[in-house]
Amino acid sequence: MPTFDFATLFWWGLPLAAAPVVIHLINLLRHRRVPWAAMEFLLASQRKFRTQVLLRQLLLLALRTAAVLGLVVALAQPRWRQAIGGLLGRTSTSHLVLLDDSYSMGDRSATGLAETVTESADGDTRPATAFDRGKRVIERIARDLSTAAGSHELAVGLTSAMASAAPRGDAVSARPPLIVPPAAVTPSALQTVRNALADVRVSAGVDGPREAIGPATNDWMAGATAGRVLWIVSDFRMRDWGDTGPAGDVLRGLAAEGVELRFIDCGADASAANLTIERLEVVGGVPAAGVLLPVEVEVRNDSPLPAEGVVIELREDGGSRPAVALDSIPPGGSATRRFDARFTGPGGHVIEAALRPDVLPADDVRRTVVDVVERVDVLVVDGDPRGGGSDGDAFFVATALAPGAGAPTGLAPRIEPPRALGVADLARFDCVWLLDVERLDAAEVAALEAYARAGGGVVFFAGPRTRADNVNRTLFRDGEGIYPVPLAGAVDLLPTPAAATPVPDVIVEEHPVVTVLAGQRNPLVEMVRIDRFLAVERGFDEARAGVRRLLSLRTGQPLVVERSFGDGLVMAVLTTAAPAWNNWARGNPSWVVVLLEMESHLARARRRAENLTVGDPVAVRLEPGVDEIDVDFLVPPDGAVVRQSAAGGSAAGLESRLPAAAVPGVYEARWKRLDGTERTRLRAVNVDPAEGRLERVGRDRLARGLADVPFRYDRTDALDTATGSLGGTSLVVPLLLVLVGVLIIEQFVAYTAGYHPVSRRPSGA
Amino acid sequence: MTRGSRRYLRPDAVHRIHRLELRARAVVEGVLAGLHKSPYKGQSVEFLQHREYVRGDDLRRVDWKVWGRQDRLYVKEFEEETNLRLTLLVDGSTSMDYAGSGDRPRKYDCAATLAASLAWLALSHGDAVGCGVFDDRLRAHVPARTRRSQLTCVCDVLEAPRNAGPGDFLRVLRTAAETLPKRGLVFLISDLLGDRDGIFKGLQMLRTRGHDLAILHVMDDDELDFPFDGPTRFDGLEIPGQLACNPRALREGYLAELGRFLAEVRTRASTARSDYALVRTGEPVAAALVRFLSRRASMAV
């Protein structure tokens, strides 16, 4: 059904179609009079050709009327629309604009048009971002609709707010689903649209049109019979549109319902190089006061060229510290740099890494929070009923974990008998070391396994009290239990024959714990002598069981193995801790190093800071009966306070939660305990680094991905707002071609009807 | 000279036709030897004068004595040679009042000029000339005479006020046939827009009575070319009626009808053994007369 972009012009111009008839009638009244003698010939001619003359006149009138009518229609700019209402019926059109506000829209890559945006009242300018271009095109859409034929209703929503049906965001940063509620677009309403757009900024989230289309259009599609146009204003990144997936299904459904789809690409064709801090985390050590913590920062280079000399600025708790640099990052690749951090006091500490701002500043900063404690408790379960003394396993393990004041490790070993497993709160311990424990009852096993499943680290040392059959029955349980491997029994390691080339008893495998010992001819490793060990049952498939070796014997049998158990890790050292079955702990520095690495490795899962991204909830767990339930969350960047009351009763316990972090930064949770003391907890929220991949999908690939979805794709710099922006197929050109044909026919008929001046040729008489 | 003679006798026309003699094709009453065929052969006539020999004169009339004396050829004219009676019938009906665009004269003015020119030619040769103007009847006329003042009388008749009405050719021509006392040459100068059957029936009556006939068919250029365009309303001058039309749309048909009319007139004139010439009002009168008289003279030889 055709409609008119300027229907008013059509109705006002329609009476002009009568102009040729009126002119013809006027001409009849304005004819000149000629007294004529030879009337008989004239009358004879008139009688003979009356019908022919009349038909030609009528045809001429009809053609001229059609030409005028065609011109009026062409000026009214007819348009063929699929489902939008026609000339006399439905002319109301509902427009929904989804503005992508994911943080990739903050891309400041130049488009070649030298666009800038005035930043402040002082006239400071900055390069325009894709988001700025998106806002501008929405203003143009609104302006065009305000003067277009028919009535138009416009609503504008941000994808971050519309990605889920429920309201998101904290009370401070929450974004309303629609920044412009559905309203008729009139010239007077344009300022409202402009004001609404002026107040919005690009978000720090990753929710783009793909996530928002479904929830955004559910309510919009319900009810009303108006025609619909869905505008998606986005930068169309490969990450979002390379695989259309469920979004493509939604778009197909919308198209099938007659919704006209318009994609407006506001991204820059060639994004400049973008560096992204992908990771910043503590990768080892014990988060105790005064202890060096190794920290790694990883930077990705989204560019076709290598990035050279990348400097990473570092800050600890807001204070500057020496920067680190990456010599070279290959194109499309990443590079990692490790540095050490040390915090003297307990509590939450913030490490911040920042790059020099590039085209996408949002992913150039990353933060992590380190919860530092005075000391980290480690439970050492001594299986020696006599306590061990200075020759016992516990002595050598505790001494290695906490050598003394001269070498603070932050670890505080607590030596307990096996029964402590059933009564102590294992959750407060960083790791649990079991040293040659003869037996554990079911409750103790259950507690230990629960602890490991929850992420705790457990180490078993063997010894003369360790009975293979007992371990297999109570701890291994055919692979269901916590013990990594089935045991065959204690075996002596026979010395190397004198005539043979000496081979170290211990072979270092590939494992991060023993990386420090890797390398050829490590004298510390060669010094270790194993006299006796617990052998693993023959035929046990370590790989299938998920068992990983740290150290092996020269005979090929495992000496130290590891396996995951739930969220935690479990290691089994198949020899004694004390230098009873070996000489390792006696004067060999590698003993301390390996034990400390083991402890750090086993505790990593518990120590790993939550990696929160924008949009994730920020939660703190509270102790019922200890903590008050009201928690104040200080929201960055200004520290605005949002109070949330804790809720609980689930397996997660009592928890206070900020529904979704809307901005990156460090969130601080404050609450009081019932005894009046204050507690705080820091949480670092970062942007999702994946959004920093700025590769664009391109029109062709987008069309292939949405092959059966009819849509129109335009770029902001090539958007035809005069006609094309309103959708439908313009009929102006075909109509003008028809009009030219009508005029040619009209001229021919006029010529044959004698309305054209001809050369005055004599009659020949 | 009356105002009519000053108006209708153009010096250039007089000059050009001065050297021509008018010859009648048929035998006229009043015996003429030599130049004119007279039904009264053999009668002697009184010598009137010498005139210079022109090609076509009967050599028997050459006065050889004069030739011997002056070495120039002269023929003798007798009084009977001047008895050619020229009767000019000029159509003064309403249709003759049409004047085309520009400075073309009315058809009546053109016809009157033709008549006056012919009268002068005839009178200069000693022929008798009579003239009548008619519409539905003979309104003004002067009988054929050779008097010196006859030209003035002819012009006065031509200029006499006309109460132009529709023409009735049959009545006028019948009247002329019945009243003309002697045979002579009758010129019908008209646009012939009327009852053509009546026209040629009347001409036949004249022919029956022995008159020599000539038709000078006067038509305006507009009537012949029909150059009109633009919305026009044609008001009939003789035929009552109006027609509002686009002239271009009817031009082709009009010209076809006109062509048929002219062809019919030529054919019927030929049948009636009448000389015929179409004279355009836009054409100089002298040229038209020269053309007519030359052709007539060549046919006479």
Image: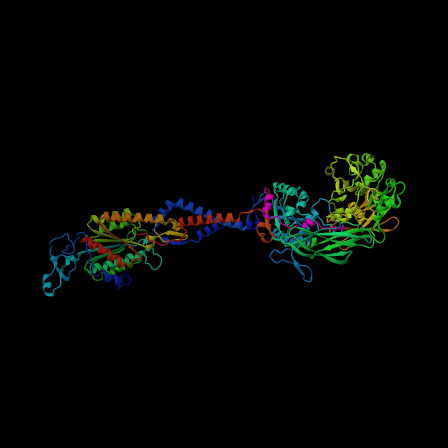
Q: Residue furthest right?
A: A386
Residue A566: image quadrant is top right
Residue A586 place in picture, x, y as percent: 83, 47
Residue A468 place in picture, x, y as percent: 81, 36
Q: For this view, does A224 lie left or right of residue A174? A: left
A701 or A21, which is in the foreground? Answer: A701
Q: For this view, does B49 lie left or right of residue A470? A: left
Residue B85 place in picture, x, y as percent: 20, 55
Q: Residue furthest front?
A: A499
A665 or B173, which is in the foreground? Answer: A665
Residue at image location 74% in from the left, 35% down from the top: A539
Q: For this view, does A544 lie left or right of residue A429? A: left
B293 or A611, which is in the foreground? Answer: A611
Q: How many marks?
A: 0
Q: Residue furthest bottom?
A: B70
Query: Which span is picked out in magenta?
Result: A684-708
Residue B162: image quadrant is bottom left
B191 or B172, which is in the foreground? Answer: B191
Specify whether residue A696 is painted magenta: yes
Quadrant for the N terminus of chain A in the image: top right
Residue B202 place in picture, x, y as percent: 25, 48
Q: For this view, does B51 lie left or right of residue B100? A: left
Residue A335 visible to an observer of this rendering: yes
Q: How is the image coloured?
A: rainbow
Residue A192 visible to an observer of this rendering: no
Specify whether residue A582 is painted magenta: no
